[in-house]
């Protein structure tokens, strides 16, 4: 890999931008695409659909045969889980997500809840959730889950999350709670399509009861959405 291409790739990774190195196997010539833009080469034909596929599935792909073979190698930003509400369900959810490889941030302006003792080694924010989510710059590698049951905290966060490109947005609460939430989100100006993205009640329907079981159902739904779309 040439020094310029490597520098561009390292810069993309430092800014959490998805990148793909495209290599023509017959001669090793390479190019780099960052966030869908061609930053360096390649000076040969490639398939943009295969670039997207490589990023979507987070795996390298060889396309074509013989002299026409091209290798697509993705360099995705880390997966991130943003949890709004440092409540009891958040603790097992954070643990499972971290084990799964997610970078996790817990947002809760109630400093007595969001403490390093309750969430060791986890990024914490005591800002208001909507402000924190804007600062975190949500992207297609982000999942957002609201857990507080408090509309003053959850609703502004959901407005930001549902307007973003986050691949998953979920909210804790019963069907009755969700119906009222939908009315509030409509009043806040969200479109029907944006609201339809919201997974609520959050998690797969596996009969979960305990906080740990609910956390498992949530993480399973996030994984299903990420892997199967």
Image (cartoon, helix red, strand yellow):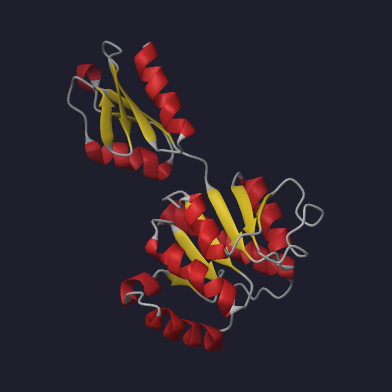
Q: Nearer the viewer, residue 206 or 147?
A: 147
User: Which residue is at 57% across, 69% downward?
Assistant: 203
Q: Is residue 1 visible?
A: no
In this view, which residue lies farthest toward the right?
117
- 34 relative to 87 in the view: left or right: left
Expressed as whole percent of the image width and height from the top left, the position of residue 31 reads 29, 22
Q: Is residue 76 above or below residue 4?
A: below
Number of disc labels: 0
Q: From where the camera sits, is residue 142 visible?
A: yes
**Residue at the spot x=66%, y=64% of the render?**
109
The residue shown at (43%, 27%) is 11
Q: Is residue 135 above or below residue 29?
A: below
Tell me where residue 60 sits by quadrant: top left
Position in image of residue 28 (x %, y %): 30, 13
Quarter in which the N terminus is drawn: top left
Above or below residue 177? Residue 172 is above
Identify the residue shown where x is 41% and y is 31%: 12
**Residue 202 image offset from top left, x and y in percent:** 55, 71
Q: Quadrant of the C terminus?
A: bottom left
Residue 164 relative to residue 51: left or right: right
């Amino acid at each position: 890999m040439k020094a310029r291409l490597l520098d561009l790739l390292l810069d993309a990774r430092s800014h959490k931008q998805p990148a793909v190195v495209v290599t023509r196997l017959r001669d090793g010539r390479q190019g780099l695409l960052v966030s869908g833009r061609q930053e360096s080469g390649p000076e040969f034909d490639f398939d943009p659909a295969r670039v997207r596929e490589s990023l979507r599935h987070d795996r390298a792909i060889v396309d074509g045969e013989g002299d026409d073979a091209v290798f697509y190698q993705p360099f995705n930003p880390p997966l991130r889980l943003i949890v709004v509400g440092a409540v009891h369900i958040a603790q097992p959810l954070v643990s499972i997500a971290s084990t799964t490889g997610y970078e996790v941030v817990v947002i809760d302006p109630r400093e007595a809840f969001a403490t390093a003792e309750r969430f060791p080694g986890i990024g914490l924010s005591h800002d208001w959730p909507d402000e924190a989510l804007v600062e975190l710059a949500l992207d297609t590698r982000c999942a957002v889950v609201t857990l507080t049951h408090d509309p003053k905290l959850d609703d502004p966060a959901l407005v930001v999350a549902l307007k973003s490109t986050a691949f998953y947005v979920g909210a804790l609460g019963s069907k009755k709670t969700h119906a009222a939430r939908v009315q509030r989100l409509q009043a806040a100006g969200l479109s029907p399509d944006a609201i339809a993205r919201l997974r609520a009640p959050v998690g797969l329907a596996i009969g979960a009861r305990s906080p740990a079981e609910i956390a498992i159902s949530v993480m399973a739904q996030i994984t299903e959405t990420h892997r199967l779309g």
